[in-house]
Image (tube, rainbow, N blue to C red):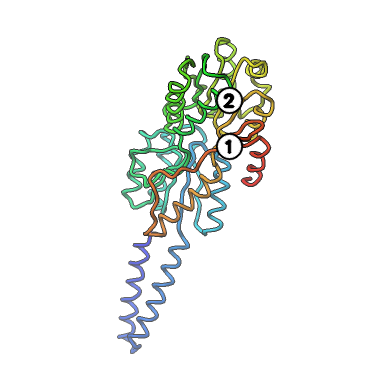
Amino acid sequence: MNKPKIYIIVLLVIVLTLMLSSAYGCKATEAVEEATETVEEATEDVEEEVTLMMMPKTIDNPVFAVVATGCEQAASELGFKLIWTGPTSDDPATQNLFVENMIVKEVDGIGVSVSDAEALTPVLNQAAAAGIKVITWDSDAADSDRILYYGTDNYAGGVAMAELLVEAMGDEGKIAIWNVQIGAPNLEERYDGVKDTLADIAPGIEILEVVTGGGMDVAKSVQAFEDYTRSHPEINGWIAVDGFPFFGTPDTMPTVAERAKAGELSIVTFDSIEPELVYVEEGIVYGLIGQRYYDWGYEGSKILFDLVTNSDADYDELVDSGIDIITNEGGEGKLSVDEMRENWKQWE
C-alpha cells in the first residue's frame, strides 16, 4: 500500500478516536496517544512493505540468473518484496507491458535492463511521473526520467576489448564484429568503444562487417557465428560485444575452434560465464571482458531500496559497477580462468 493511503487511513483513525472520546467520556489526551501509536505502527508497516521490481531483458538468459541471485540476497537482507520478472524473448513491447503492470500495482521502485531505449523511454517516464523510483541497470535509457544507471561503463568495456584484441593479433588484419541485438544501448556503446579505439591504436585493422544472429537465441547465435567464420576465411579476428555464440560448447563451432587453435583467428568477447571460460581454457578465445552480474542485482537493488526509503539518498547519474579482464593465465591487471571460477563460486 502506498504511504499517502496509509496516512489518510491514520488521519481517519485519529478523527474517529477523538469523536469516540467525546461521545464516551474518554480523555482526549489518551485518545491522541492511542492514535499516535497507530500512526507509528502504520508507518513501520509501510516501510516493511516496500516492493521493488527488477526486470532483465530476457528472464532465461544465464547471465541474468546471477543478477536474480543478487536481487534475492538484497531482498533477504533489507526485507523488501522483490518482483523478478521479464520477457522470455527479446521483446521491448513486452518489457513495456511489464512496466505498465507495475505502475498499476503501484510498486515503489522499478529497475530495468533496457532492450530498446527509444521504445522503453515513454513508459519509464510514465512510471517516474507516477512517483515510482526508476533506475536502469546493465543497459540504459539515458534520455528517460530514470534517476540513474547502475552497471558497466560499456564504452570503456569496448575500449578494453579493442586493446585486448590488438594484444592478441597485432595491429593489422581484418575482423568482424558480433552483435546479437542491433540497437541495444549497451551493445552499441561497446561497439563505439571498439571502433574508436581501433581507429586510434590500430588503424591497420579493418572492420569488415557487423554480424548478428537473429535475437537472443544461443543456438542461432552459435550457428551464425560458425557459418560466418567458415564463409569468410579472410578474417583474422572477431570481437563479440555479447557472449551468446560462446554460451554453448566448443564442439558446436568446429571451424572457429580449428582456426583459433591454429593461430589464424583471434577472438575477444564480452561476458565471463562458465561456458566462455572453457573457450579461453582451450585456446579458442583469447580473452573475456567480464561484468559484475551479481552486483547488478545485489548493489542495484540496494540502491533502488535506498532511493525509495531515504529522502537524502544521493548518487551520481552513472554508477559504474566495473569490469574484469580474463585471460587463461591472467596477470598484469587481468584475472586467470581459475581466479574467475573462484569468483563464480561466491556468486552462485
Q: Is residue 136 left or right of residue 84?
A: left
From the image, tell me which residue sits under label 1: 333
Give the amino acid at mark 2: Pro
Q: Position of residue 88 (x, y in %)?
A: 52, 35
User: How many marks on residues?
Assistant: 2
- Which label's residue is closer to the chain start, 1 or 2? 2
Q: Which mark is drawn over residue 208?
A: none
Q: Disc 1 versus disc 2: distance between alpha carbons?
A: 26 Å
> In this picture, is 153 found above or below 107?
above
> In this picture, is 91 found above or below 79?
above
Residue 335 or 240: which is nearer the viewer? 335
Residue situated furthest front in the rendering: 332
Q: Residue at the location (50% across, 52% down)?
A: 82
Identify the image quadrant of residue 338: top right
The quadrant the N terminus occupies is: bottom left
Q: Is residue 130 left or right of residue 343?
A: left
Crowd rating for badge 2 (residues with CA inside 10 Å; few <14, some 14–19, many 20+): many
Element class at badge 1: loop
Identify the image quadrant of residue 10: bottom left
Q: Position of residue 251 (x, y in %)?
A: 68, 22
Q: Is residue 28 left or right of residue 176?
A: left
From the image, tell me which residue sits under label 2: 245
Element class at badge 2: helix
Q: Residue at the location (40% across, 43% down)?
A: 318
Q: Is residue 338 left or right of residue 5?
A: right
Give the amino acid at mark 1: Gly
Q: Is mark 1 in CB contact (under 8 Å) with mark 2?
A: no
Identify the image quadrant of residue 15: bottom left
